[in-house]
């Protein structure tokens, strides 16, 4: 069997799994189940959640400040199971890339992904042991977005190698792709900071905030990245003005991100290369969807499914920019 084809299928499966992990992670966080299991990697000392009275009593005795809740425990553990499966698959892909005749670029990328997954697992552990510290939660979110982006890039690269077909590219869009990625990653970081500091509902109205254009805000307190150890961040620790500052920063970032990606999508749709035009159309649809979901989160007071979808579409929007970057960079065979 063609080793490139086997690796391509593994990349496709890994991309799907990575997207599922992002969705499950968002669902776990937004349903307040991030500490559904107060230990790691197990849940109250076991790798499988149980409804046995003996298990529940032992769990409550071991963690009296964090009583056992079966629904939250299962949400957290299912997220860990799928993330663990993805990690094993990436380990297999790295081993396969080195064992078979695969190009150096793909081997290094697979190895880098394996190291990143190991670090991501550590971030997952620290998310629990450091009691949802916002900085760690945001790094964990960015780690997930980086993993899916690199997996998707590898899939595109292996797919191109496997096709044996030459392609057209437009290097004039490379800098736009990089600029768009930087802006979007910063906005995703702001979104993670908003969520981890429980600031999503700090402004319950739209387009105003607390019925004002510029409400009372505390930016100095809002963006303290590290507040020491031993603080339980579940439910948030910031006061109203600090949370409002975070929420408004995310809104301002959304406007900047929208205008940036809108300009990029328009430039793409004006290109002569059909594949780039198609990517631009997809990017525009995702951008409009993402903005609509963000507004719906405020207007309808953060419905769980809408909030989770907001995270998922952010990942897809990121992949659309990765696609543009791949389409604009000449690939040496």
Image (spheres, helix red, strand yellow):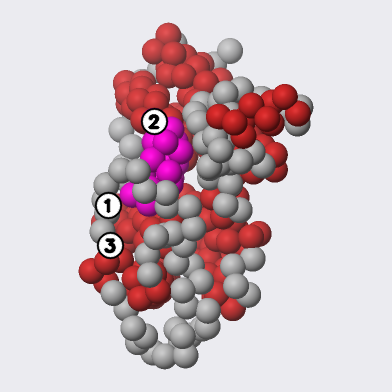
Residue 195 vertical placement versus 42 (above, below): below
Tell whether label 3 touches label 2 (CB within 8 Å): no
Q: Circle 3: is it few (<14), some (14-19), or many (20+) Cα within 10 Å?
A: some
The boundaries of the magenta stretch are 122-146
Q: Where residue 150 appears, x then y in whole percent?
A: 41, 37
Quadrant for the C terminus, please.
top left
The numbered mark at residue 122 is: 2
**What predominant SS class does the magenta segment belong to?**
helix
Q: Residue at x 58, y 13 (%)?
A: 1
Between 284 and 133, the residue placed more toward the observer is 133
The quadrant where residue 51 appears: top right
Q: Of helix, strand and loop, which one carries label 1?
A: loop
The quadrant where residue 54 appears: top right
Question: In the image, 250: left or right of 205?
Answer: left
Residue 126 highlighted magenta (yes or no): yes
Q: Residue at x 64, y 65 (%)?
A: 303
First in sequence: mark 2 vs mark 3: 2
First in sequence: mark 1 vs mark 2: 2
Give the CA distance from mark 1 to mark 2: 20 Å
Q: Where residue 38 appears, x then y in whole percent?
A: 52, 36
Residue 46 highlighted magenta (yes or no): no
Q: Of helix, strand and loop, which one carries label 2?
A: helix
**Residue with the most extreme right position:** 52
Q: Which residue is mark 1?
A: 227
Q: Circle 2: is it few (<14), some (14-19), or many (20+) Cα within 10 Å?
A: few
Give the CA distance from mark 2 to mark 3: 24 Å
The numbered mark at residue 175 is: none
Q: Where residue 281 appears, x then y in whole percent?
A: 52, 64
Q: Of helix, strand and loop, which one carries label 3?
A: loop
Q: Residue at x 54, y 34 (%)?
A: 63
Q: Which residue is mark 3?
A: 223
């Amino acid at each position: 069997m063609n080793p490139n084809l086997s690796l391509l299928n593994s990349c496709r499966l890994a991309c799907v799994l990575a997207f599922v992990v992002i969705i499950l992670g968002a669902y776990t966080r937004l349903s307040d189940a991030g500490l559904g299991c107060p230990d790691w990697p197990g849940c109250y000392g076991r790798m499988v959640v149980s409804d046995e009275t003996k298990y529940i009593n032992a769990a409550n005795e071991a963690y009296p400040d964090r009583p056992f809740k079966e629904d939250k425990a299962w949400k957290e553990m299912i997220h860990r199971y799928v993330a663990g499966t993805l990690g094993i698959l990436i380990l297999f892909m790295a081993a396969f890339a080195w064992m078979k005749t695969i190009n150096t670029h793909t081997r290094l990328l697979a190895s880098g992904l394996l190291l990143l997954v190991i670090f991501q697992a550590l971030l997952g552990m620290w998310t629990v042991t450091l009691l949802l510290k916002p900085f760690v939660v945001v790094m964990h979110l960015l780690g997930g977005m980086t993993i899916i982006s690199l997996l998707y890039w590898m899939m595109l690269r292996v797919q191109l190698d496997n096709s044996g077909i030459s392609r057209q590219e437009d290097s004039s869009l490379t800098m736009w792709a990089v600029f768009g990625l930087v802006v979007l990653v910063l906005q995703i970081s702001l979104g993670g900071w908003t969520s981890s500091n429980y600031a999503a509902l700090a402004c319950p109205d739209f387009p105003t905030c607390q019925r004002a254009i510029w409400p009372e805000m505390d930016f100095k307190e809002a963006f303290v990245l590290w507040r020491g150890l031993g603080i339980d961040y579940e439910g948030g620790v910031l006061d109203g003005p600090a949370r409002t500052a975070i929420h408004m920063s995310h809104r301002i970032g959304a406007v900047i991100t929208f205008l940036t990606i809108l300009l990029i999508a328009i430039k793409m749709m004006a290109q002569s290369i059909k594949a780039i035009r198609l990517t631009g159309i997809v990017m525009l649809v995702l951008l409009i969807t993402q903005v609509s979901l963000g507004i719906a989160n405020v207007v309808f007071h953060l419905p769980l499914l809408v909030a989770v979808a907001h995270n998922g579409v952010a990942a897809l929007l990121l992949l659309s920019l990765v696609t543009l970057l791949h389409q604009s960079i000449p690939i040496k065979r």
